[in-house]
Image (cartoon, rainbow, N blue to C red):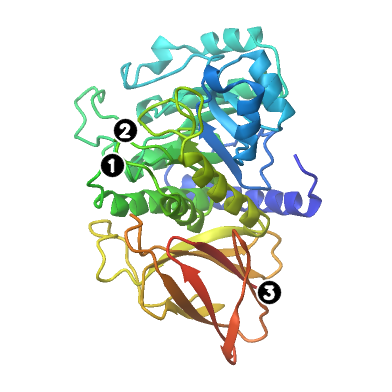
Amino acid sequence: MSNHPTKKQTHTLTRLFTTAVLFLLTMSTGAQPATYCTKHARMDRNRINIGVYHLQPYATDEPHIRDLHDCGIDFVLCMRDERPALDLLYKYGVGAILYDVLPQWWPKQKKNGQMKEIYPLNMYVKAAKKWKDHPAVWGMDIGDEPSALDMAHCADIMREMEKQFSNQFIYLCLYPNYASVTENTADQTLSQLGTRTYAEYIKEYCRLIPADYLCYDYYVYSSLTNANKVPKYFENLQIAADACTATNRSLWITLQVNSKLPELWISLNQLRYQAYTAMAFGAENIIWACYTAGWWYNQVVDKDGNKTEQYPKLQQVNKEIHALSPVYMKYRRTGTSFVGFNNTPWLNGSGIQFSAEYNDGVFGKLCTADLSPLVIGSMVSRNADATHAIFVCSADDPHNKAPRQHTLHFTTAPGKIIKAHSGEGEVPVKLIDKNCYALTIQSSQGIIIEAL
């Protein structure tokens, strides 16, 4: 990892403080606070990392891996333990999370609640002892979308594998909130989640799993008629991000670059919409599905190894995310607000409240001149130096039907120096009155505004 002593010391103090708070909270309910596995020796957690699902064998020669690097990809998931490909990934500075070293739990093909019986801990220990390290390997995958009924066993696996692997962390991805939440049967094996609600599912993860991150996937553009998925997308972000903030975890999210239907192609602005709304909720790892064939259609690289029209789109949004990363990672998310969502369907049925303007004591009266929807992440400095920031995503056009330019107005507390940044560089901020400012923001654009 990069050597940033001040930031690391601050992270340690923050984790200690949060652990103390969690201890008091969990003791009141009888639960025990988790001790996190925090081994990420090869993943630089001081920056936003961008991952992709699947690098198929037809895309593992040097030109393809060079293209992967040039696309702004930091790591690959569902990678195989193939040494020539891993050698090339290491050459180009791309990490791998392997899925074929440890037993893989896929609850859709097995019975929820029976992971411990089908895959006992000794199977993982035996597999780990056979494996030889490789510098490209950042982590090991133990499966996908576990039921809450199997999380205690997943936790035991994580803790044991922390001992077995010198340089790797254990990767686990959760269900989104559109997984089945039908009433469980008596033996609780029919529900995908293993809980009555999604909020309970996330709560069980935070109670049981010792990872210092929470990762889930959400594919908001998985059908032609997906307007109803936007509110659920925000509801999912709210539940997961609030859980991360409360338990001092890092939010990781898998988003969509390919399409469930062959006639759909995700646009650049739709990629931005996904990434920047997630960043307004504090996302620190953004993962795209799928780069090569994995599931669905219209991947970034097709089955013949050719780059599709998704390649330059993904390359552009990744470039923007990485450009924002140094400023963004100076801060941590404390909450997320919604402004101007009246007369839109984007929060219908979610239970999420919105307001006409944003006020937090540092920034005030923030809204667009045309009262368009904004998702705003409140942020404070990780270094506890009294600086604040907000991450603003212009969220008026999730389906990229009529993108527009908006004028954003806001006030700040006296004496603050205001700086704004987008993925394309510093954003001009106009002083229109004492402590009153304005700037321009495009539909689906993300801008971080600092009050220094």
Q: How crowded is the residue under tag 1: few (<14 C-alpha within 10 Å), some, or many (20+)?
A: some
Whether residue 424 is situated above or below residue 270 in the rendered picture: below
The amino acid marked with disc number 1 is Thr
Disc 3 or disc 1, which is closer to the eye? 3
Q: How far is disc 3 from disc 2 in space, using C-alphas?
A: 44 Å
What secondary structure is marked by label 1? loop
In the rendered structure, which disc, 3 or 2, sits on the residue that comes first in sequence? 2
Label number found at residue 197: 1
Residue type beneath disc 2:
Leu
Residue type at the position of mark 3: Leu
Residue 261 position, x and y percent, is: 29, 35
Q: Give me the C-alpha separation between circle 2 and circle 1.
A: 8 Å
Judged left or right of residue 12, residue 354 is: left
Name the residue at 60% across, 49% down.
319
Q: Position of residue 250 (x, y in %)?
A: 56, 46
Please provide percent x and percent y for residue 37: 61, 33
Question: In percent of the image, x 55 and y 13: which residue is there?
Answer: 124
Q: Which residue is mark 3?
A: 452
Q: Which residue is mark 2?
A: 193
Q: Is residue 219 above or below residue 125?
A: below
Position of 308 with respect to 344 (left or right) is right
* Viewer-side label of 3, 2: 3
Q: Residue furthest bottom?
A: 433
Whether label 2 touches label 1, CB < 8 Å:
yes
Quote the CA–CA distance across marks 3 and 1: 41 Å
